[in-house]
Amino acid sequence: MAYLLERRKFFAHFVGLGYTSGMDFDFLFRGAAVIDGTGAPAFLADVGVRGERIAAIGDLASAQGREERDARGLWLTPGLIDAHTHSDAFLLLEPMCPSKLAQGVTTEIGGQCGGSAAPRLNGARLPSDWEAQTYPPRVGHAAGPGPNWDTVADYRACLEAARPATNLILFAGHNTIRKGVMGDAPRAASAEETARMVRVLEQALDEGAWGITTGLVYHPGVHSRPEEVSALVGACARRGGWYATHMRNEGDRLLEALDEALGLARATGVRTQISHLKTAGRANWGKVDAALAKIEAARAGGLCVHSDRYPYLSSGTELDIVLPDWAAAGGNAAILAHLDAPADSARIVAELDVSGRDPEAIRIGGTWTPETRPCSGRTVAELMDAWGMTFGETIVRILRADRSRTGAFFSGMCEPNLLKILAKPWVMAGSDASLRAPWGPLGRDWPHPRAYGTHPRFYRMLTQTLGLAPEAAIHRMTGLPATAFGIPRRGFVRVGDFADLALIDLRAWRDVADTARPHAFAQGVDTVLVNGSPVFMCGQFNPSAPRRGRFLERA
């Protein structure tokens, strides 16, 4: 910390609003190295919090705090913003948000990849790991398995009742909206169906959604034509919303998919987030420079385009994504019917066996039955050897036993490309993961390690591998997403802003989780405040502190 200003220079940085000697605070950090989220050099200061806000920054030696933390030798940063998450439904089950809170995350941006918890109309089916849970009773409704809300307003009421420890920004998912309007129909939408989807989206935006996301590689979004997506994105832009897209392709047709996304941004003016930018598959690694050039040309042309990325070389989704299109069309009910029909399952096996997929590159994640639980953490190649089965036979056996709910991790990226992407100043940290906990209903899963380790790993790659200053790396996880998404009064350490703060030992901050031991908390975070409440103190969760996380409103 030799580069920091000495304590005698505090007053050069003093920005206390109306500070007078003897002022008291609800919480007081003493002697922290403050990284304010702007990318500017860190400085030594005390930081006082009153209620939900930062009240003063400077030399507060004569002040007292109802609670205090000696922060000497540690760095005080804005609470981290996870720019791409899937925690919407799980916040209702585990509102302490432990896997994210232990990293220093105070705000998540959910509803990504076209799948959001709401609006869930006409019983629209949500992702299988969400559907499999039993949620707290909704006011006025009987308890039972599965989701029990419909609109964004309903979901907000459920979230408020759960009192989460962290904040949530919710996007409305295109696939969820589409299922509510036309089910899992594997076809293009009619003009009337598209108009109904637009009306559902407009209601969601009116009720607090920040924009729309697409997952155009997933069913049923894969069946949508450009005019359907354009109508929805245009409606979102007219209401000042954002667009985040898991593009139609991240491999063989990566550049064409990027042209579609950027074309929508040009046509509508919508602020655009390219989700988890990657070049999937060895044959496509050479496309990274062209992909980055397209985005930078769009930005130079005045478009508001950013991206997020997790610092891992394997992706994570559901295993059934490997199924042939005809077998996956129509949603989970259709998949199960095909798996259970001998002729159809034999056809699936035959097509998978000649698909060219590498069984070494697919590792099984979360499983749901006694037969499949021993598969978690193992590659498909290992299971093929153990069972004496072909690739297709192994996949069908697992999916049939798990009723098509199996999670999986897919290798297919390279580190040089990852570093090229992370080096771009418009790329922010996004875990692409739901919150997790090593206990309770979420502890039985086998998550991707990014659920527990994205942010310290992102920081380490930027500072140790790419050589960025700590302040620049923290900016990518705080001030950059706050500015890109227009999040008011968060992402910075400033007087008057909400007291979302993380006290971190940056020298010890590291990820621990891996595919063999995924439920392992990150190390190095000392204290986290969310809206002024110290929900994580001295490296431990603090259940006695009030949970003040909230559903955030657009400015």
Image (cartoon, rainbow, N blue to C red):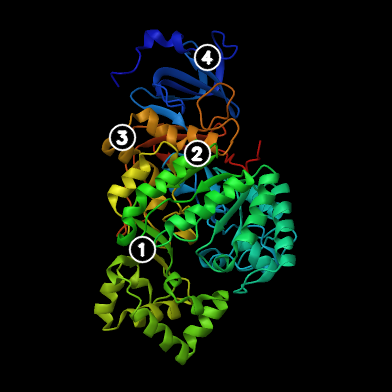
Label 4 sits on residue: 15
Of the residues under marks 3 and 1, which one precedes in the sequence? Answer: 1
User: Gap between marks 1 and 2, in whole Å?
Assistant: 31 Å
3D distance between C-alphas at marks 3 and 2: 25 Å
* Residue extending furthest toward the bottom: 343
In the rendering, which numbered label is found on residue 410? 1
Give the residue type that dot 4 points to.
Val
Residue under label 3, please give it.
463
Judging from the image, what secondary structure is the residue with disc 2 in? helix
Depth order, front residue of 297/199: 297
Nearer the N terminus, badge 3 or badge 4?
Answer: 4
Percent from the top left, x then y, of residue 360?
27, 68
User: What's the CA distance linking mark 2 and mark 4?
Assistant: 34 Å
**Which of 462/73 is in front?**
462
| Quarter of the image with the N terminus in it | top left
Q: Quadrant of the C terminus?
A: top right
Residue positioned 54% across, 56% down in the render: 90
Residue type, label 1: Phe
Helix, strand or loop at label 1? It is strand
Tell me the CA gap for discs 3 and 1. Answer: 27 Å
- Find disc 2 in the rendering and name its residue: 299
Residue 517 marker: none
Of the two numbered discs 3 and 2 on the same chain, state the one appearing first in sequence: 2
